[in-house]
Amino acid sequence: AQSVAQPEDQVNVAEGNPLTVKCTYSVSGNPYLFWYVQYPNRGLQFLLKYITGDNLVKGSYGFEAEFNKSQTSFHLKKPSALVSDSALYFCAVRPTDTGRRALTFGSGTRLQVQP
Amino acid sequence: GAGVSQTPSNKVTEKGKYVELRCDPISGHTALYWYRQSLGQGPEFLIYFQGTGAADDSGLPNDRFFAVRPEGSVSTLKIQRTERGDSAVYLCASSLEGAGEQFFGPGTRLTVL
């Protein structure tokens, strides 16, 4: 069975500073990895995905994530945080070797960007 | 274009009642998913449709939960004999095909009193 760990319930950063939201995963075979963002009273919005290829993936709103196979991690990063980035972020994984399409999500990390 | 829509946005019901939650996926998306999100948790998978058929229903918690997608577009999640523990936000997602990224609707907040 696959699992996702987001070790930080909350991350606080000052506007303009770089941000990192951590994610580690456990899955058989090679994974598909995703980051989603959830704003209050709104659905999940897709940010980026890793399927194969370059370990550094660029996504929406200036976010990027680095796939590290040896550390089974897929941390979300942004060089310069904005107050508007404050939201709940979810990492998700999907196996590629079982035919299952369901995403397994982490418990989420709340990002708070202070002005 | 229109995203995934879900109705109702909120549903309050009494313990033991039957409820139906509707999902209208993005036009042309063949894959449709239902997830459940409890407070403070990430979404948990319930069921996945490819076309009209349920390709994976391993996440349905028990036989009170059932979902259909008769024409390969709109889907309805049905919950019988609701319990207070069923209270959650029910999310629907769709994708172009089974391997693509999933696009989520705004969810239906179900409250069972």
Image (tube, rainbow, N blue to C red):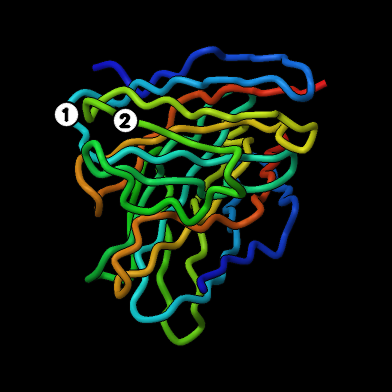
Q: Is residue B31 above or below residue A27?
A: above
The count of marks equals 2
Q: Which residue is mark 2?
A: B69
- At horizontal 31% and vertical 26% (from top left) the residue drawn is B25
Do marks 2 and 1 share a chain? yes
Residue ranking furthest to the right: B113
Distance CA(mark 2)–CA(mark 1): 14 Å
Q: Is residue A65 above or below residue A109?
A: below
Residue ranking furthest to the left: B28
Badge 1: chain ID:
B
Disc number lying in front (2 or 1)? 2
User: A76 or B94, which lies in front?
Assistant: B94
Q: Which residue is mark 1?
A: B28
Q: Position of residue B20 (x, y in %)?
A: 53, 20
- At horizontal 51% and vertical 21% (from top left) the residue drawn is B21
- At horizontal 46% and vertical 76% (from top left) the residue drawn is A27
